[in-house]
Amino acid sequence: GKSRRARSKRMEKAVLVTLIFADRSDGWSAQDSSRELAELAKSSGATAVRELTLVMKSPQPRMFMGPGQADEVRRAAEAAEADVVILNRDISGTQQRNLETLVGRKTIDRTQLILDIFARRARSNEGKIQVELAQLTYLMPRLAGQGILLSRQGGGIGTRGPGEQKIETDRRRLRDRIAFLRKELDRMQER
């Protein structure tokens, strides 16, 4: 009904974190990177309540960023009462879990953000299946143990798309779902 639609319309408040390396080896300026992140976040339906740019020498194994920087992100998210932290880079499932645990907020990396935008825009059945397949394939390795996904029942960015109710199921059901979607897609493409 209407109240559900109204609830999903609420813009998620996001802290945008642009991570750049001191040597700037990727050729993007910090401004370009944070501008791009802001555009992507807006497309996914988030409201940026705070933007941080963190300069680092190299990715750290535990949370991609250093513990001091992660704490800075946590403080910014708490002060801004943010729902989500969005990063301009891709991080591993373990780094994502560690960061979410420390920050106490859902954390989305660049690929999840982009997949979410596709999920919002997919209209055709084929498009929806392709997006769900991409999301599930991306989430699969992130389901280790407790998984970050179990805390994501609230919906919103990174949980959108046809797969949102199924994501918290176990790996085997996820694998079955992926196999099923691939078959569906093949069938559609044959037609």
Image (spheres, rainbow, N blue to C red):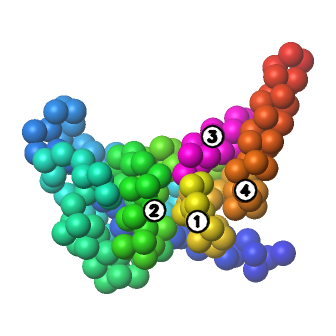
Mark 1 or 4, nearer chain start? 1
Judge the density around disc 2: few (<14), some (14-19), many (≥20) Cα neighbours within 10 Å. Answer: many
Which residue in the protein does label 4 denote?
170
Residue 105 part of the magenta segment: no
Identify which residue is drawn at 16% across, 52% down: 56
Mark 3 or 2, nearer chain start? 2
Which residue in the protein does label 2 denote?
97
Q: What residue type is labelled 2?
A: Arg
Judge the density around disc 1: few (<14), some (14-19), many (≥20) Cα neighbours within 10 Å. Answer: few
Which residue in the protein does label 3 denote?
137
Span highlighted in magenta in the image: 124-142
Q: Please state the horizontal and vertical placement of residue 106, each as a whole percent of the image.
A: 48, 67
Front position among marks 1 and 3 = 1
Under tag 4, what secondary structure? loop
Q: Please state the horizontal and vertical placement of residue 88, each as a whole percent of the image.
A: 35, 49
Residue 146, label in figure: 1
